[in-house]
Image (tube, rainbow, N blue to C red):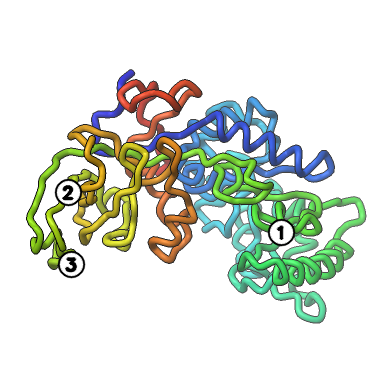
C-alpha cells in the first residue's frame, strides 16, 4: 500500500520495538517479571502494532490505563495479566472486571469503591495497593510510622480483594532520590506484606524505565517498562532504538526578500533573502505551538529551523541552505533521516517539556503506519501499512 493520503503521518518501527523488548529482558534477567506498558495507545505507537509483538515474545503482563486498551489487548488473544496503572473510576472498574484487569488501589476511599464493585459482581478483584513511599503524593496510601487499623481492615484483609501487588511510583528521574524512595518502599511494603495472609505472596514493584535500568536495586519482583520499550531513553549504553518517526513533506516553496516577516504576529524577520518551505503540520496535529521559532526538522538529512509562530496545520522551515530542496521532499520532525535524527532530547530542548508530552499524541492524531526493515532505505511513498486502530 502507498503512504497515507495525509499531510503528515507517524511511522512505527516494529522491529525496533522487538529489539528493545529483547534487550531489556536480557538486562533484567529471569528473576524479575516484566510488565510491558501500552498506556496512551502504546505511547502513540499503537496498541494494534505493539501487542502482537508482546504476544509473540511471550510477555505475560501488560500495563494499561483505559478499558479500551484492555479490550484491544484481549482482542489480539492476550491471555496474560492486565494491570491498570492508575486509580480507575467506578464505571471503569466495573467494566474492567470483564477484561480481568488488576486494579491499582489509590487510597482507602478508592478501595471502598473497588470493594463495592466486587460485591455487586459477586467476585473478588485482584488489586495492587499503592503506597506513597516515594513521595509522589498522588494516589498512594501514606504509611507514615505504621499502617493504620483502618487501612488494614478496609484494604488488606477485605474479602473482596485478592492482593497480588504492593506498588509505588517515583516522582523524578534522580538517582539519589530514586534510591531513597526505594529504601522507604522496601521498609513499608515489607510491613504491609507482613500484615497479609501468610499464604499470599504479592509482588512488590515501584520501578519504571529510569529506575529499572539505572538503579537495579529498585527492581524488586516486577518492573513496569514503557518509555524504554519505544526507545525513549539513553539507558543501556544507547542499545535501545527509537521506534517512531513524525513525517511530512514540503507542500510549497517560496523565496522572500530580506526584511520580510514570516508567520503570525510577525515573530520572525528575514535578515536576508530566504527560501521557506511550507510544511503541513501544526498544533492541531500535536506539533505544539511551543516549537515555533525553536524546533529543527530534517530535510535531505540536514537540519532546517522552524522559523514561524506555528499555525493550526502549518509551519515554515528555512531551507535556504539546502539548494537541492524540492516540493514533495520528505520532512522529518521527529526521528532519523540520513545520518542525523531529531531525538527526544532535541524535543525537550526545543520545548522545555518531556518528549512524551508530544509523541504520545502524534500517533493518535495522525495516520500511523508500520515500517519494515527495508523501509529504512525506502522513500515514504513505498511504505507498507494502513491507518492504525486508535483507542478512544
The quarter of the rendered structure image containing the N terminus is top left
**What residue sits 44% from the left and 63% below the top?**
353
Q: Which residue is mark 3?
A: 267
The relative height of residue 56 versus residue 324 in the rendered view (above or below) is above
Residue 212 lies, in percent from the top left, at: 71, 53
Label located before the other in sequence (2 or 1)? 1
Residue 82 lies, in percent from the top left, at: 64, 42
Residue 12 lies, in percent from the top left, at: 46, 34
Are circles 3 and 1 on residues that touch, CB within 8 Å?
Answer: no
Disc 3 to disc 1, how far (Cα)?
A: 45 Å
Q: Which residue is mark 1?
A: 206
State the image quarter where residue 324 is shown.
Answer: top left
**What residue sits 29% from the left and 29% below the top?**
4
Callout 2 crowding tier (Cα within 10 Å): few <14, some 14–19, many ≥20: many
**What residue sits 29% from the left and 54% below the top?**
305
Q: Which residue is mark 2?
A: 276
Q: Secondary structure at mark 3?
A: loop
Disc 2 to disc 1, how far (Cα)?
A: 48 Å
State the image quarter where residue 215 is shown.
Answer: bottom right
The relative height of residue 260 versus residue 24 in the rendered view (above or below) is below
The relative height of residue 47 versus residue 212 in the rendered view (above or below) is above
Amino acid at each position: 500500500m502507498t503512504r497515507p493520503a495525509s499531510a503528515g503521518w507517524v511511522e512505527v518501527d516494529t522491529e525496533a520495538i522487538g529489539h528493545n523488548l529483547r534487550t531489556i529482558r536480557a538486562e533484567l534477567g529471569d528473576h524479575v517479571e516484566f510488565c510491558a506498558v501500552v498506556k496512551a495507545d502504546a505511547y502513540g505507537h499503537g496498541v494494534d502494532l505493539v501487542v502482537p509483538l508482546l504476544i509473540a515474545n511471550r510477555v505475560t503482563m501488560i500495563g494499561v490505563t483505559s478499558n479500551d486498551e484492555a479490550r484491544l489487548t484481549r482482542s489480539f488473544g492476550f491471555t496474560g495479566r492486565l494491570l491498570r496503572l492508575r486509580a480507575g473510576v467506578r464505571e471503569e472498574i466495573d467494566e474492567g472486571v470483564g477484561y480481568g484487569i488488576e486494579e491499582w488501589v489509590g487510597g482507602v476511599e478508592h478501595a471502598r469503591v473497588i470493594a463495592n464493585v466486587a460485591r455487586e459482581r459477586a467476585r473478588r478483584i485482584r488489586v495492587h495497593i499503592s503506597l506513597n513511599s516515594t513521595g509522589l503524593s498522588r494516589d498512594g496510601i501514606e504509611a507514615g510510622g505504621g499502617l493504620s487499623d483502618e487501612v488494614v481492615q478496609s484494604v488488606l484483609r477485605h474479602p473482596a480483594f485478592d492482593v497480588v501487588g504492593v506498588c509505588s511510583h517515583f516522582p523524578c528521574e534522580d538517582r539519589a532520590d530514586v534510591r531513597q524512595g526505594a529504601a522507604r518502599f522496601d521498609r513499608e511494603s515489607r510491613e504491609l506484606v507482613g500484615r497479609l495472609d501468610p499464604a499470599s505472596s504479592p509482588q512488590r514493584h515501584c520501578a519504571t524505565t529510569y529506575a529499572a535500568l539505572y538503579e537495579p536495586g529498585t527492581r524488586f519482583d516486577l518492573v513496569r517498562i514503557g518509555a524504554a520499550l519505544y526507545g525513549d531513553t539513553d539507558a543501556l549504553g544507547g542499545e535501545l532504538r527509537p521506534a517512531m518517526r513524525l513525517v511530512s513533506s514540503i507542500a510549497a516553496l517560496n523565496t522572500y526578500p530580506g526584511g520580510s516577516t514570516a508567520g503570525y504576529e510577525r515573530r520572525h524577520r528575514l535578515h536576508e533573502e530566504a527560501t521557506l518551505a511550507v510544511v503541513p503540520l501544526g498544533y492541531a496535529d500535536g506539533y505544539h505551538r511551543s516549537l515555533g521559532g525553536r524546533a529543527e526538522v530534517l530535510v535531505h538529512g540536514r537540519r532546517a529551523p522552524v522559523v514561524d509562530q506555528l499555525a493550526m496545520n502549518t509551519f515554515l522551515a528555512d531551507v535556504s541552505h539546502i539548494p537541492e530542496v524540492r516540493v514533495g521532499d520528505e520532512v522529518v520532525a521527529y526521528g532519523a533521516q540520513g545520518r542525523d535524527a531529531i531525538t527526544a532530547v532535541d524535543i525537550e530542548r526545543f520545548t522545555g517539556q518531556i518528549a512524551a508530552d508530544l509523541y504520545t499524541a502524534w500517533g493518535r492524531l495522525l495516520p500511523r503506519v508500520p515500517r519494515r526493515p527495508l523501509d529504512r532505505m525506502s522513500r515514504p511513498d513505498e511504505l507498507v501499512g494502513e491507518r492504525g486502530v486508535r483507542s478512544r
